[in-house]
Image (spheres, grey):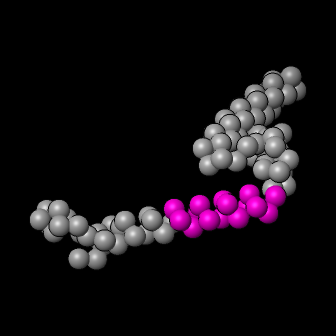
Amino acid sequence: MTSDIDAAAQQAAAFLAGKKKADDTAFMLAQVLAMMGVKVGDRRSWPQLAGRASLSGEPSVYLGTVPMATAKTLIDALIYAETAKRFRWSVRTPADEEAGTARQDGSP
């Protein structure tokens, strides 16, 4: 049986682990946004981005409010990425034909 102090210490450790994971994720997202030309902390671009965690240690990333122009930029980038991914997997190259490899979706 754990004491109240041990239980509190475990809860604190879980919270800190979740907070660290959320902070790392928020940092990586900020880096990706920076590569896209979106500045985190700029009121006109992306005002707020923060890692958070619940008391149970569940990590989350708070995105804040995002201006419409930035949201449209992100939507366009996501649509482009998905289209490029689908196109890449739907086209067979001559090298695929020679190797006899099938497409990712399982069709011949």
Position of residue 47 measured from the top left corner of the image (x, y, whole percent):
83, 46
Residue furthest out toward the bottom: 107
Residue 85 picture location, percent across and down: 44, 64
**Which of the two residues, 97 or 103, is positioned nearer the viewer here?**
97
Q: Is residue 28 above or below residue 82?
A: above
- Range of the magenta residues? 67-81
Question: Image check: 47 left or right of 29?
Answer: right
The one nearer the camera, 26 or 10, is 26
> At 79% from the left edge and 63% from the top edge, which residue is drawn?
68
Which residue is painted at 62% across and 65% down in the image? 76
Nearer to us in this view, 8 or 4: 8
Which percent across, then down, holds residue 15?
78, 34
Would residue 18 appear left or right of 92 to someone viewing this image?
A: right
Say which quadrant the N terminus sits in: top right
For residue 2, what is the image quadrant?
top right
User: Residue most toward the left?
Assistant: 98
**Quadrant housing the C terminus:** bottom left
Judge from the rendering whether residue 8 lies leftward or rightward of residue 25; answer left or right. right
Residue displayed at 66% across by 47% down? 37
Residue 80 can be seen in this image: yes
Characterize the magenta stretch by its predominant secondary structure. helix
Q: Is residue 107 magenta?
A: no
Q: Quadrant of residue 103?
A: bottom left
